[in-house]
Image (cartoon, rainbow, N blue to C red):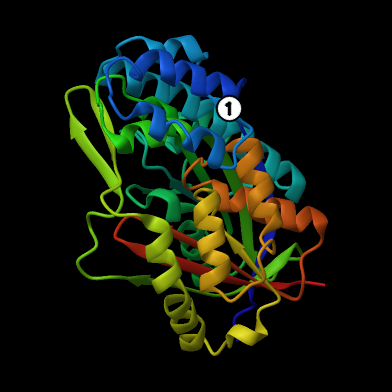
Amino acid sequence: MTDPVTLVSIATAVPPFKIDQREAAAAARDSFASRFDGFDRLARVFDSAGIRSRHLAQPLDWYMQPRGWSERNAVYLAAGEQLFMQAATAALNKAGILAAQVDTVVTISSTGLATPSVEARVADQMGFRSDVERVPVFGLGCAGGVTGLGLAARLASARPGSIVLLVAVELCSVAFRLDKLTKENIVATALFADGAAACVLRAGAVGLAQVEASGQHSWPGTLDIMGWSVDDTGLGVIFDRAIPPFATANMGPAVMGILQRNGIAMADVDRFACHPGGAKVIVALEVALALEQGTLDHERAVLADYGNMSAPTALFVLDRLAQAGLPKRTVLTAMGPGFTASCVSLVHAA
């Protein structure tokens, strides 16, 4: 019987430029108010999003100038490499593992293009072996951290004893657009931020928790809910349907189905740990998962301190839960483009 896969360590990283939400609101007003008739009504999202501060790859003034695709992607590469190394190094140090011991690197990212991919670009600086296996994954969006954790666990299980490093790194800010006078674009400037998270996994090891199960659920006919559009200027956010009502109506049955396929009942879960897409999404998830309002406290704290960083954000929540002390069973959840729900069940290793 194969030893269960253990989450040995987790670590996070953010870029150096921290902005207050009031600064972001003022900058958005300067940029959009005179050109978008409904700005005053939309501007309320800066107050209602549940965010106090965020971290960006560039100073705020950088985003106030027109930028093309090549400039944006250059920032994605430079900042992404730094965030990858910071998060990965911290996770490896916590695990007491050298980069040269890593057998597989899974990189999750959807906010820029890198070929060779980010882990290849930093391989020499990190000290990865020449035979390390690279698994770059693109297009998972906000679900990427949770889906990536499940993927990394399956890779670790396939080769018992091997060390798998998962890194989710996103530079959402490079998609901030001055030229798109749409509700979706303005809401994005109120929500999104940059960051990275890394996890070390290994079968049979001692660590924070064992990865018990994982799974996904995709809804037909929902490709328009969330994603990127692509044009000469760069990526543009797509929100063609309100996500909180969709989550309220659909997440409960989807999560229940994923857990039941793995022999787990909803009542067996001690803590749901959710990707905090926004304040209204958190409330919707509490309703969908039949939780008391206010239960998702770490989610609200991460959102307040960091904003929505896409894929890494759920792992930031997991990191806070781990620091506070994980209960017996935690189920990590996220929603992302597809439209897809992703879950990973963790059992405390104590």
44 or 328, nearer to the observer: 44
Amino acid type assigned to the residue bearing label 1 in the image = Gln
Q: Is residue 196 at least partly visible in the picture?
A: yes
Q: Which residue is mark 1?
A: 21
Q: Is residue 135 at least partly visible in the picture?
A: no
Q: What x and y, as percent, mark residue 150?
A: 50, 65
Direction from residue 252 to residue 324 in the image, left or right: right
* Residue at the image position 79 percent from the left and 53 percent from the top: 323
Q: What x and y, as percent, mark residue 267?
A: 64, 86
247 or 306, nearer to the observer: 247
Q: Quadrant of residue 225?
A: bottom left
Q: What x and y, as percent, mark residue 266?
A: 59, 84
* Residue at the image position 25 percent from the left and 20 percent from the top: 179
**SS under mark 1:** helix
Q: Is residue 290 above or below residue 275?
A: below
Q: Residues within 10 Å of mark 1 (few under 14, many from 20)?
A: many
Q: Quadrant of residue 292?
A: bottom right
* Residue at the image position 59 percent from the left and 44 percent from the top: 197
Q: Is residue 86 above or below residue 210?
A: above
Q: Quadrant of the N terminus?
A: bottom right
